[in-house]
Amino acid sequence: MKPKISFQGVSRQFDLGHGEAFLALDRLSLDIADGEFVTVVGPSGCGKSTAMNIAAGLMKPSAGAVLVDGVEVSGPGPERGVIFQQYALFPWLTVQENVEFGLKIAGVERAERKRTADHFIELVGLSRFADALPKMLSGGMKQRCAIARAYAVNPKILLMDEPFGALDALTRVQLQDQLLSTWSRERRTVMFITHDVDEAVYLANRVIVMAAKPGRLHRIIDVGLPYPRNEAIRLSPEFAAIRNSVWHEVYHQHASQTEQKALEEN
Amino acid sequence: MAKSLWRYFPDPALLALNGGAFAVGLAGWALVTHFGVVGLPGPGEVFSRAVDLVRSGQLPVDIFASLRRVLTGFLLGVVLAIPVGFLMGWYKVARGLIEPYVQFFRMIPPLAVIPLAIVTMGIDEAPKIFVIFLASFLSSVVATYQGVISVDKTLINAARVLGAKDGTIFWRVIIPASTPFILVGIRIGLGSSWATVVAAELIAAQSGLGFRMQQAQLYYDLPTIFVSLIVIGILGLIMDRFLLFAERKLTIWQERV
């Protein structure tokens, strides 16, 4: 089957000035299937956010390409929804208006807009707050609103950049369950960046572990646990086993060849 | 509705303190002048002069003349400053071309331009309005430009990934996001316009509150000077509160700490 998202040898280099460059992402190749939920973990500097920004079209690759449905990504577009860690709600718009923002741009007529927005606001459990401004909402509610906003434009894929990173542990667990329930009802291909190993295993079909210096693919681990996921799965020995192996891959990575060379030279 | 309006008034305890401070000040003024500590007119004398000036119609005429100048110049300045500020924030080329001039003219007090304005524009309304225009333009243009360049990049990206193109981003993200900055700039602009109009009238005018004070100075007419000063203060305060109210209304979405 043709992959939904395909990273093909994607590299990204940042110019540091003085003729020096920093390789944030080194030839990442990765296929994500339609409807798959993939999480990406790795130490800071592993290029996971860079990879996501390139897929979102917010950043250009220095080499390689990202294909979505076989078409090369050349800029941002509504078929690829993005959820940011800082929520990025428009503070001057209400929850309802935020969710309708993308639909309005697309020229969807008023009644239809309202119907779609109502549906997704209800799906994330914010119906009572439809007319509230973002400043009235807690962090978790803001992120739920952002998820509804991303869903409203009917994207084929969702790119999520540490969406729950700024939330407390309890809210985070609740939002993970809610995201999975939303995903099971409104199936999309999801690429979810996180630095939390538990979160990565709990949500995903597959966990992509990345390595730093330079940022690159390290290991792909199949989770293989059934959906719907719940507390029983979270506390099961199978979950713990997968979690341990992901943990090991994230925290005990062998130094890369370039790093080893640098060490030898010193 | 009544409740939401009520928010714009300070709480009663604070209001009582304000009133108390005002009464003490007035009493102090009355005492000091009554016992001849300083050779200044007392509150009674100033008040009755104010009544005379209102009755004769001179004060309303002066107020009207000053307000007309300040509002004309101020509005012209703001109306030009906002598009120019957006242009500077949005296009690098415009910024590079305009900013040196803005930064340079900002360093010249608008009043210093008066001699040049009078020589080139005559002694009519034009030079005064021009100077006020300059004062409000310079403070509003910098604020607008600052507002545009400090719009959160994530908000722009969020709009982009929802399908927004440059035009939509400008109207639906840049403008609302920079409104708080612009309103602060406008308020500062009105303050400096007001200061400038009075000073301009002191130098060259045939009407207005500044002109009246200048005349009174010639005749050693202290009560009239006092009336003018107090009226200038009150009008400035009213205009500032009005803008503050508009600012609060328009930026009610801001998270205030």
Image (tube, coloured by chain):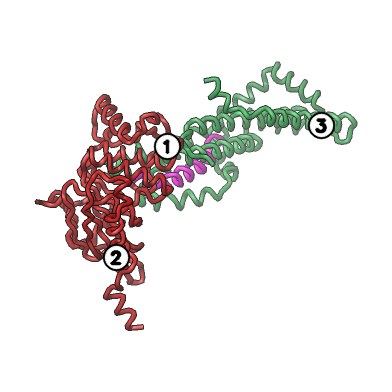
Q: Which residue is mark 2?
A: A249
Confirm whether the magenta stretch covers residue B133.
yes
Q: Position of residue A233 (x, y in %)?
A: 29, 49
Disc 2 residue type? Glu
Which residue is at 17% across, 60% downward?
A8
Chain in green, by letter, is B
Instruction: Tell me which numbered mark, 2 or 1, is placed earlier along the sequence.
Output: 1
Left or right position of A120 against B217: left
Tell me what hue chain A is rendered in: red
Foreground residue, A236 or A129? A236
For the question of whether residue B120 can be seen, the reply is no
Query: The C terminus of chain B lies in which quarter of the figure?
Result: top right
Mark 2 falls within which chain?
A
* 1 vs 3, front mark: 1
Which chain is mark 1 on?
A: A
Q: Amino acid at mark 1?
A: Pro
The residue singled out by tag 1 in the image is A134
Residue carrying label 3: B29
* C-beta proximity under 8 Å, tags 2 and 3: no
Q: Main secondary structure of the magenta part?
A: helix
The x and y percentages for residue A257 are 26, 75
Residue name at image x 71 percent, y 21 percent: B53
For mark 3, does the 10 Å Cα neighbourhood hold few (<14), some (14 to 19), or many (20 or more) residues? Answer: some
Q: Is residue A215 above or below residue A156?
A: below
Residue B38 at x, y percent in the picture: 86, 36
> CA gap, disc 2 to disc 3?
80 Å
- Could you say which quadrant of the image residue A242 lies in? bottom left
Disc 1: CA contacts within 10 A as few (<14), some (14-19) or many (>=20): many
| Residue at the spot 20% in from the left edge and 51% down from the top edge | A74
